[in-house]
Image (tube, rainbow, N blue to C red):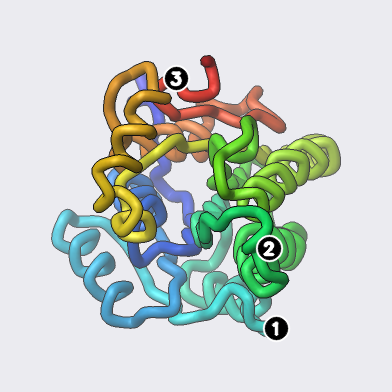
Amino acid sequence: MREPFRLDGKTAIVTGGSSGIGADAAKALAAAGAAVVLVGRDKARLDAVHAEIAAGGGSTETLQVDVCSEDGPERIVQESIALLGRIDVIVHAAGVFEPTPFEQTTDDILDRQWAVNVRAPFRLTREASSYLPVGSAVIFISSIAGHVGFPNSSAYCATKGAVELMVKALAMELAPRGIRVNAVAPGNVHTKMNAHLFADPEYERRMLDATPAGRIGLVADISPAVVYLASPESDYVHGASLLVDGGWAAR
């Protein structure tokens, strides 16, 4: 019997692959047998993740590219194909979270989050779509903030709400071509991006009080969902958003 959730012979692009959820997802995809292209802006951090994957016997390449740059999507697609020959999986893990009270949210705060969280994955998916074979998967890292209101995060919620409906719309268009488009929606997860928030005991207490599971998530909680949605086992899953949130959105 074939081992489930294997990705042998597949290739994957992971944006935001130098840290946090993206880095852990890349490690999990590589452990499942995929050859992974790590995309990020920080060469040192990319190299560190690359070295960790390689030390475990995984296959990986790095691309130092800003996903928001005008030529970013074309570079990522063309260089990934040049490196690995094909694209089977895209994981949109690059993201920005700038919690700010609504009346203090400037246009720049809104625009930065929109550019990274919505515009960049939209453009990269569009650039890659003609190269994606039957059985391929596009996975967006969304958020509980795309499902329920989140305090002091109106701009972020707007971007993740957009991601949730972009997933559904793209699934409608791409499913007939055998391309799966889905999302993973994490709850509160400890990452470098939000470490400064959890440094405040009161903030952590509020997040714990709102999480039925009684703990803050880890990046390792998210990666198995990414591997599942990348694998053939999710062949009949299209346009879904898999909440991995400790029960936050079930309240």
Q: Are marks 3 and 2 in contact (CB under 8 Å)?
A: no
Residue 70 circle label: 1
Give percent across and percent down for residue 113.
62, 63
Question: Residue most toward the front?
Answer: 103
The foreground one among 164 and 137 is 164
The foreground one among 72 and 99 is 99
Give percent across and percent down for residue 104.
63, 63
Is disc 1 placed on a helix, strand or loop? loop
Question: In this rendering, does residue 30 appear at all?
Answer: no
Query: Foreground mark, 1 or 2?
Result: 2
Query: If you read the primary sequence from the N terminus, does the residue marked by circle 1 or circle 2 appear first?
Result: 1
Q: Are marks 1 and 2 in contact (CB under 8 Å)?
A: no
> Which residue is tagged 2?
114
> Which residue is tagged 3?
247
Q: Give me the C-alpha separation between circle 3 and circle 2.
A: 27 Å
Q: Say left or right for 107 vs 88.
A: right
Is disc 2 placed on a helix, strand or loop? helix
Q: What is the three-letter code of the residue carrying label 1?
A: Glu
Q: Give me the C-alpha separation between circle 1 and circle 2.
A: 15 Å
Q: Is 128 placed above or below 185 here?
A: below
